């Protein structure tokens, strides 16, 4: 099922600032699209609008071309008639019911025959790995099993799409990684359209066909995980995805080609620098460099930045260095197997060719 959102605006009663502002989004049939952003960016509110749990003040929502909300014509289709499954952050598993009763509850509400309910419950339970747990009381389930019950309860309705509102946030890190793989495999197997809300970029990268990055009620960029990471549309996207180093600079030109001056140094840009090709020489810019695109070099090496190590963090397979350059601390990612310099040591920082991202200085973070 395709999902189209146009010009959606919503503000809660008693507030002046909209939660969603003139927002548009197209979700393709059968894709897994993730709404990614910090708390308060509007991603869960957008999901609830699509589900029919929130009523926007203006805009339009269409499911497979069918209008389910239109502020101009006052069309409104109730949530239960939209045929969408939803999995919430809290699994909402009823403790007084068995696994089978939890999964089959939506079908009982629809008053389907008992035989059909039992067949469909058994089918989806097998699909999510709960076939041997149907008679087990819900309180005896682990967190991961309860998450599967919530997913099975959404699937048993045979929905046109499934909406996920941070369903893995209550799980520990290892189980969350395992459930990510199961969710993605199940979505591919069923071909159902999925919209997934999270603030975790690792989840978004692992699960998504495309990612919509949100901030303050608007969508800043939509693209594949590779596109939004390697070609961010704004300083905000660059910083939110991968925690880029953002510094102020100025474009210039010399005999060797185009360069950028930043933190008291001049670095070659290569041809052309993403985002900077249309800007004139002398233009003030915001420069984004990812930690993994910086590497240690000899102090004073040509084309490098000179600084002092202020922090060394061991992160398992990685180390993160904080290197002070020209009054700013740049994050530098390096393998854990490589010996790190001591705090206070003078180092050079080399920038990977073509990995400097340029934005106009007048642009806000978002």
Image (tube, rainbow, N blue to C red):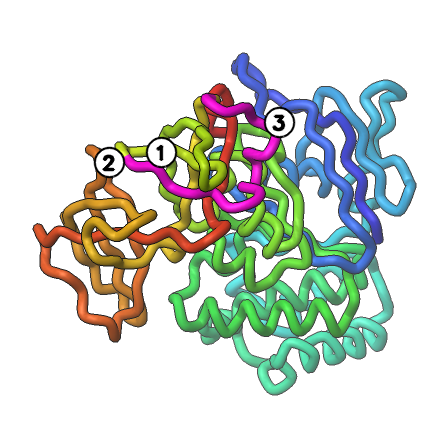
Span highlighted in magenta in the image = 265-282
Q: Dot 2: within a 10 Å radius of its alpha carbon, few (fewer than 14), some, or many (20 or more) residues?
A: some
What is the number of the mark on residue 247? 1
Q: Secondary structure at mark 3?
A: strand
Question: How far from the left and from the top, in percent, is residue 300?
Answer: 21, 49
**Is residue 281 shown in magenta?**
yes
Tell me whether the residue at label 3 lies in contact with that at label 1, contact meaning CB atoms closer than 8 angstroms. Answer: no
Q: Is 194 in front, or is 144?
A: 194
Q: Is 12 in front, or is 8?
A: 8
Q: Give how far apart the Cα atoms at labels 3 and 2 are.
A: 35 Å
Report the mark closest to the observer, 3 or 2. 2
Q: Is 214 in front, or is 260?
A: 260
Direction from residue 308 to residue 315 in the image, left or right: right
Residue highlighted by disc 3 = 20
Residue highlighted by disc 2 = 328
Tell me whether the residue at label 1 lies in contact with that at label 2, contact meaning CB atoms closer than 8 angstroms. Answer: yes
Q: Quadrant of residue 277?
A: top right
Please tell me which residue is depicted at 49% across the width and 39% down the height of the picture: 257
Direction from residue 322 to residue 71 in the image, left or right: right
Q: Is 249 in front, or is 31?
A: 249
Q: Tag 1 or tag 3, which sits nearer the N-term?
A: 3
Report the mark closest to the observer, 3 or 1. 1
**Is residue 347 at all visible to an observer of this figure?**
yes
Q: Secondary structure at mark 2?
A: strand
Question: How far from the left and from the top, in percent, is residue 151?
Answer: 64, 65
Q: Tag 2 or tag 3, which sits nearer the N-term?
A: 3
Q: Tag 2 or tag 1, which sits nearer the N-term?
A: 1
Q: Secondary structure at mark 1?
A: strand
């Amino acid at each position: 099922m395709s999902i189209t959102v146009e010009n959606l605006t919503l503000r809660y009663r008693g507030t002046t600032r909209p939660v969603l502002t003139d927002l548009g989004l197209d979700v393709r049939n059968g894709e897994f699209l993730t709404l990614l952003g910090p708390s308060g960016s509007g991603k869960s509110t957008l999901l609830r609008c699509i589900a029919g749990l929130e009523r926007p003040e203006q805009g339009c929502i269409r499911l497979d071309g069918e209008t389910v909300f239109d502020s101009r014509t006052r069309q409104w289709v109730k949530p239960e008639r939209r045929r969408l499954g939803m999995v919430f952050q809290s699994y909402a598993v009823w403790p007084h019911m068995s696994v089978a009763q939890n999964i089959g509850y939506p079908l009982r509400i629809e008053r389907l025959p008992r035989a059909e309910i039992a067949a469909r419950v058994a089918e989806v339970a097998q699909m999510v790995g709960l076939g041997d747990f149907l008679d087990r009381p819900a309180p005896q389930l682990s967190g991961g099993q309860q998450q599967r019950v919530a997913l099975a309860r959404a699937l048993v309705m045979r929905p046109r799409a499934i909406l996920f509102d941070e369903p893995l946030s209550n799980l520990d890190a290892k189980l969350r990684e395992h459930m990510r793989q199961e969710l993605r495999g199940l979505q591919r197997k069923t071909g159902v359209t999925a919209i997934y809300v999270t603030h975790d970029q690792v989840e978004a990268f692992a699960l998504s066909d495309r990612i919509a990055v949100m901030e303050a009620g608007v969508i800043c960029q939509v693209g594949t995980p590779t596109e939004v990471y390697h070609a961010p549309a704004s300083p905000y996207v660059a910083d939110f995805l991968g925690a880029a180093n953002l510094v102020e600079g100025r474009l210039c030109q010399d005999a060797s080609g185009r360069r950028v001056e930043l933190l008291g140094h001049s670095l070659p840009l290569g041809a052309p620098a993403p985002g900077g090709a249309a800007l004139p020489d002398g233009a003030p810019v915001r420069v984004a460099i990812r930690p993994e695109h910086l590497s240690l070099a000899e102090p004073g090496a040509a084309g490098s930045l000179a600084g002092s190590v202020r922090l060394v963090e061991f992160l398992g397979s990685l180390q993160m260095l904080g290197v002070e350059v020209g009054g700013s601390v740049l994050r530098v990612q390096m393998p854990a197997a490589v010996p790190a310099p001591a705090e206070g040591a003078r180092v050079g920082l080399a920038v990977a060719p073509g990995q400097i991202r340029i934005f106009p200085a007048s642009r806000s973070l978002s």
